[in-house]
Image (cartoon, helix red, strand yellow):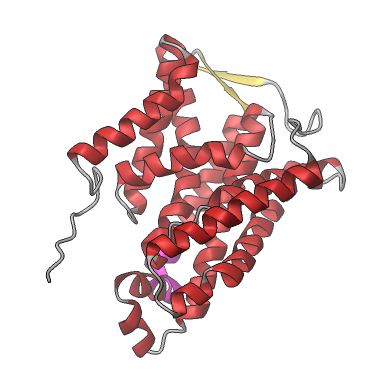
């Protein structure tokens, strides 16, 4: 029982970490609290649903297509809403308010066009059989979550640490003005960061949709609390911290549902968020920033 709960928690936490990675990447590089991020999560799930149900694509093809589609949506929304704010050096509050209004409008449009009812992937899109290892059952959907998360996280780390683009992204995160003076096209790099964040959010939406086989427009809104918990606990802008905090949150939620009451999961997540903000505002793996006048 304990081993099964541990495996379930790690796999669920891997999806939370994937979702939060794009969120922390966007904030860490552009210092933007973009509340439309949850919409990219929902959009990815719906794009995969349409690809499998209407186009008849297998899930291994629908997953990357839906992720790329979410990334393109993120680029368009960033260009329409946030590029101008960055140019005029608007405050973080300005981006927060603009994206708050935008996400309400986007969810309203999504509900109008696709409805608020829960949708499900076609039967047989992924094998329903479970595999047993040392008494622990793992479903095909959970195996896909593990593989997809490993590939995306590994690809992101390789990009950030081993390419010129990754160096440009890190430079933009550290010193935006200096990055521009060094010849980096900051507008292009910001668009790429938005795309990567949208890809990660969209992939997370597909994987969560597969794991629970339930898709609805506001599923991204429900994930935003978990995203905030992960990036606050892990440390703002810290990729390693987001991974660890995501897995820890998944373990805590599974333990709460398995040994206490499942309806308390959101309350526990909120309690963790408040406790970390009270005791270590920079996060468990983040570094406090000293501001001098």
Figure check: 185 above or below 201: below
Left or right: where does residue 186 sit relative to residue 147?
A: left
Residue 139 is a magenta residue: no
Q: Which residues are magenta?
A: 157-167
Residue at x 37% of width, y 31% of height: 270
Residue 4 seen by the camera: no
Figure check: 176 above or below 59: below
Q: What is the magenta segment's predominant secondary structure?
A: helix
Residue at x 47% of width, y 73% of height: 85
Q: Position of residue 108 (x, y in %)?
A: 70, 47
Q: Position of residue 262 (x, y in %)?
A: 49, 16
Q: Position of residue 254 (x, y in %)?
A: 45, 21
- Residue closest to the eye, 223 or 13: 223
Residue at x 45% of width, y 80% of height: 87
Q: Residue furthest left?
A: 292
Where, quadrant-wise, is the N terminus in this rendering?
Answer: top left
Report the number of discs.
0
Residue 158 is a magenta residue: yes
Left or right: where does residue 192 sit relative to residue 118?
A: left
Figure check: 245 above or below 129: below
Q: Position of residue 90 (x, y in %)?
A: 41, 72
Left or right: where does residue 54 sit relative to residue 260?
A: right
Where, quadrant-wise, is the C terminus in this rendering?
Answer: bottom left
Residue 244: image quadrant is top left
Residue 142: image quadrant is top right
- Residue closest to the eye, 99 or 211: 99
- Residue closest to the eye, 195 or 86: 86
Residue 261 seen by the camera: yes
């Amino acid at each position: 029982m304990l081993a099964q709960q541990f495996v379930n928690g790690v796999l669920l936490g891997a999806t939370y970490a994937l979702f939060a990675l794009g969120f922390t990447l966007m904030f860490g590089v552009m210092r933007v609290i973009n509340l439309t991020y949850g919409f990219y999560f929902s959009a990815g799930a719906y794009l995969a649903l349409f690809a499998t149900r209407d186009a008849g694509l297998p899930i291994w093809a629908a997953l990357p297509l839906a992720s790329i589609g979410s990334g393109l949506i993120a680029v368009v929304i960033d260009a329409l809403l946030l590029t101008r704010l960055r140019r005029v050096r608007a405050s973080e509050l300005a981006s927060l308010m603009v994206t708050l209004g935008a996400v309400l409008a986007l969810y309203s449009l999504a509900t109008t066009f696709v409805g608020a009812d829960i949708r499900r992937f076609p039967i047989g899109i992924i094998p329903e059989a479970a595999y047993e290892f040392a008494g622990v059952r793992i479903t095909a959907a959970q195996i896909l979550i593990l593989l997809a998360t490993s590939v995306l996280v590994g690809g992101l780390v390789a990009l950030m640490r081993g390419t010129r683009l990754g160096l440009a992204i890190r430079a933009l995160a550290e010193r935006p003005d200096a990055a521009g003076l060094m010849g980096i096209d900051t507008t292009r790099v910001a668009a790429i960061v938005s795309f990567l964040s949208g890809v990660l959010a969209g992939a997370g939406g597909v994987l969560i949709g597969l794991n629970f086989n339930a898709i609805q427009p506001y599923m991204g809104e429900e994930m935003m609390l978990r995203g905030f918990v992960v990036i606050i606990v892990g440390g703002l802008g810290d990729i390693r911290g987001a991974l660890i905090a995501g897995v820890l949150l998944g373990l805590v939620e599974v333990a709460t549902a398995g040994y206490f009451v499942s309806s308390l999961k959101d309350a526990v997540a909120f309690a963790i968020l408040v406790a970390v903000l009270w005791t270590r505002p920079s996060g468990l793996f983040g570094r406090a920033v000293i501001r001098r006048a």
